[in-house]
Structure formats: C-alpha cells, structure tokens
Image (tube, helix red, strand yellow):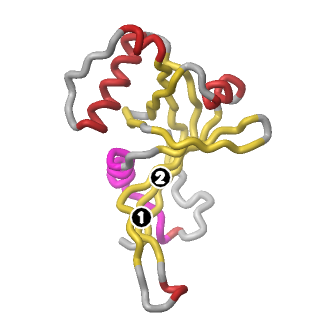
Amino acid sequence: MSSESGAGMCRSEKEIQDDSLIDAVLAEALVCRLGLVDGGNPYVVPMCFVRVGDAIYLHAAREERKIDILKQNDAVCFEVEADVALVPADAACGWGMRYRSVIGFGRAASVDDPQKKVAALDRLMEKYSGRGGWTYPDKTVRQTTIIRIGIERMTGKQSGF
C-alpha cells in the first residue's frame, strides 16, 4: 500500500501527511462509500466497514448489485470521513465544512473461508459495538458475503484543523 502524497490534490496544504491521522480517520469513520464501475457507469454504495492492516472489510448479502458488479470488475475506490462539522459565517460565501477524509483505491475479492469470514465479522462487530464475544449462526455466515479490499494506495485530506 502506498500513500499518494500530493498526487492530484489541488490544495496540497489540506493533505494529511501523518499516517497515524489517516489510521485514526479510518478507525473513527462509520460509513465507507464504495465506488464501483458498472459497465461504463459509476455506482457508489455506502457500507459499514473495518480496516485491518492493509485491507478494508465490508459485509453484504450474497445477492446484491454490488456483488454482481465486483464479479465483473474488482477495481474499487473508497471514501470515508470523520470529524465533520458545519462552519457557519456571517457572509453566505464564508460558510464551510470542517472534516478529515480518506480516499483509497484497491482490488476487491470475496472472502470464502468460513473462519476468515467470522474473523472479519468479529472485527466489524468490535468496531460498531465496542465489544467482542459475538457468535454467528452457521446459516448467517454462509449467507453473508465478506468483501476484502486490498488497499493499493490512499490519501487523506483535512479542512478546518
């Protein structure tokens, strides 16, 4: 995985260059917007996610549009944000947003091994519930698709900090 330091970022002063801050944004963010290419058309879907090392894990039902799209094209883009707040001002054009965000690119693959699926579900549940010790019925594990995105590169941006 590599950072895109300055690559394509119009406002380089907003770039997050501290990897630990990028890690914090990925840990804090609640929604990952997954960008896919459906034929020649863009398709974005919000999903729950967790980052584990150099990958992001998401879960989905087996029969969903995003799964069909990924079978045809595994290249993805993802975006998350944290610390989002509206910044009011006296003048209309003075209003702004405070935020930290991460955009990344990678390749998606389905996790088929039941033990690896449970491990990913455990990490997802720990992130969203704040605790571990969950159990999952075998049927639920079989019917759940876990998507692993191997992160190839990503960059962070912040405003208002």
From the viewer's perspective, tell me whether residue 77 is left or right of residue 17. right
Mark drawn on residue 99: 1
* Residue at the extreme right: 40
The percent position of residue 19, horizontal first and vertical second, equals 37, 51
What residue is rendered at 49% in x and 85% in y? 94
Q: Does residue 22 belong to the magenta stretch?
A: yes
* Viewer-nearest residue: 127 or 155: 127
Q: Residues within 10 Å of mark 1 (few under 14, many from 20)?
A: some
Could you tell me the amino acid type at mark 2?
Answer: Val
Q: Nearer the viewer, mark 1 or mark 2?
A: 1
Which quadrant of the figure has residue 113? top left
Residue 4 relative to residue 158: left or right? right
Q: Is residue 110 above or below residue 29?
A: above
**Label annotation for residue 124:** none
Secondary structure under badge 2?
strand
Residue 116 vertical placement versus 39 (above, below): above
Q: Amino acid at mark 1?
A: Tyr
- Res. 8 image quadrant: bottom right
The span shown in magenta is 13-28
Find the distance from the CA under tag 1 to the CA under tag 2.
Answer: 10 Å
Residue 122: give x, y in percent of width and height.
30, 24
Is 17 contained in the magenta span? yes
Point 34% across, 55% down: residue? 21
Q: Is residue 13 above or below residue 150?
A: below
Q: Is residue 125 left or right of residue 109?
A: left
Image x and y of residue 144, in percent: 46, 19
Instruction: Characterize the local packing of mark 2: few (<14), some (14-19) or many (20 or more) Cα atoms within 10 angstroms.
Output: many
Q: Which mark is residue 102?
A: 2
Q: Is residue 29 above or below residue 36?
A: below
Magenta stretch mostly in which secondary structure? helix
Mark 1 element type: strand
